[in-house]
Amino acid sequence: MDIEFVRLCDRWVGTLVCRILSGSERVRKLIFTSPASTSPKNILVIEISEMGSVILAYSMLQEVKRRYPHANTYFLMFEKIRESLDVMELIPRENVITLSDKSLWAFSRSAFQAVRKLRRLHIDTVLDMELFARISSIFSYLSGAQSRIGFYRYTMEGLYRGNFLTHKVQYNSSMHIAKNQMALLDALEEDPSSSPLVKRNYNKLDLTLPHLKNSAEDDRQIREKLKTNCPALSRDGRIIILNPSGGDLPIRAWPLDYYISLTQLLLQEDNLVVGVMGLASEKIWYKRMAEEISSPRFFDFTGMTLSVKEVIQLFNCCDVLVTADSGPAHFAGLSSIHCIVFFGPETPTLYGPLNTNSTCLYAGLSCSPCLTAYNHRNTPCDGNNLCVQEFKPEYVKGLVLKALTENPA
């Protein structure tokens, strides 16, 4: 579905449904007494649309397992991003409930099926990781859960998503999203009458990600693909992978002309090969670059990774990734690759990769970040993203060479 259409539906239809459900909850409280709180037995985590946020939730999901080892944990998300969860092997695959975003009809049908399944599962606790999207709060209420934890607007105008949360957590736009996610879990241990609900120090919180290593067979297959696509790759050659796409939000992308210049600069160095990765539908990036770059050490890897797991396997066989702030930047955190990430429309303070083997580029212009939870990532920018254009190809080349020096093959 078109992202603007989704925003409109969430704003108008979502607001109406939230008001109806809020009224229903007020009536329910007048008639029925809420049951006493018990230890969670069936926990639902909701993160519908953001691949990167799923990866960043690793520590929180691990903590759910540690604190409630006997509880069943379920996850609600779009089908198209479920691989980002499966690859971490934290939630049993049969416990992942998916929604379709192919069309409004497909979404409505899958949403009805999801709610029916959630009611059968007797969900008692919901951790809603979405920020101020109304659809996720609607799912949390319709699940029938006794405890519903999510981000609440408090004194902020707009951003209404109903008044039926049992545990209201204040979203902190100056704290990394992984710490915000941990606050949702910690809210279960707090008195719901306190405000704000969670007042904890997360400065020493361990947010490290696991390194998913390749098997010998994984290495063999990926290196075979690399050699097929780049015959000029030598045994001891260093591999730079570029991800020119900005994903669903093109405003995050570094200009294609800059990627072309960076590639030409890198290919001046001996023993380096440069490739372009992405979905098969993004092959246009490689074709447009190939028109200006004529070198046997420049290769196309778009469409060659068919799963998130294969993307991570590719990263384990390469040396440096240059990318916008998108899914691949966070997948890199599960691998050994050094990741150079362009920020600007969003900020690394909130969404920086959790691995130490990364370089975040953020110029801090007066208008950055413009994609926030408060505007549902709907930027006012005219498309001239100077915040990422601040970083010139010559500068990025220096960062790539530095990473290669500090991380020997």
Image: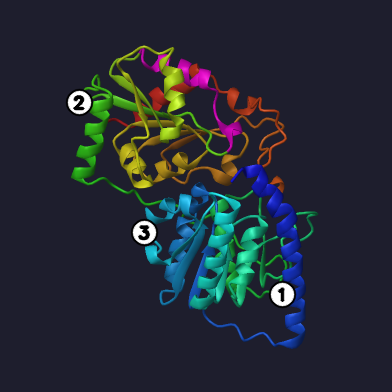
* Residue 248: x %, y % from top left: 56, 39
Mark closer to the observer (3, 1): 3
Asked whether the beta carbons under mark 2 and mark 3 sit within 8 Å of each other, the answer is no
Q: Secondary structure at mark 2?
A: loop
Q: Earlier in the sequence, mark 2 or mark 1?
A: 1
Q: Earlier in the sequence, mark 2 or mark 3?
A: 3
Residue under the point 72% across and 35% down: 380
> Is residue 267 in the magenta section?
yes
Q: Which residues are magenta?
A: 249-268
Q: Amino acid at mark 1?
A: Ser
In the displayed structure, 295 sits above or below 87; it is: above
Question: Alpha carbon of mark 3 to alpha carbon of mark 1: how far?
Answer: 35 Å
Left or right placement of residue 189 versus residue 157 in this view: left
Nearest to the observer: residue 402 or residue 141: 141
Q: Amino acid at mark 2?
A: Arg
Question: Alpha carbon of mark 2 to alpha carbon of mark 1: how far?
Answer: 63 Å
Q: Which residue is mark 3?
A: 89
Residue under the point 55% across and 61% down: 109
Q: Which residue is mark 2?
A: 235
Nearest to the observer: residue 2 or residue 47: 2
Left or right placement of residue 356 versus residue 29 in this view: left
Asked whether the beta carbons under mark 3 and mark 1 sit within 8 Å of each other, the answer is no
Q: Secondary structure at mark 1?
A: loop
Q: Which quadrant does the C terminus fall into?
A: top left
Q: Quadrant of residue 382?
A: top right
Q: Residues within 10 Å of mark 1 (few under 14, many from 20)?
A: few
* Residue 381: x %, y % from top left: 70, 31
Q: Which residue is mark 1?
A: 193
Residue under the point 22% across and 38% down: 221
Q: Residues within 10 Å of mark 2 (few under 14, many from 20)?
A: few
Left or right placement of residue 21 versus residue 50 in this view: right
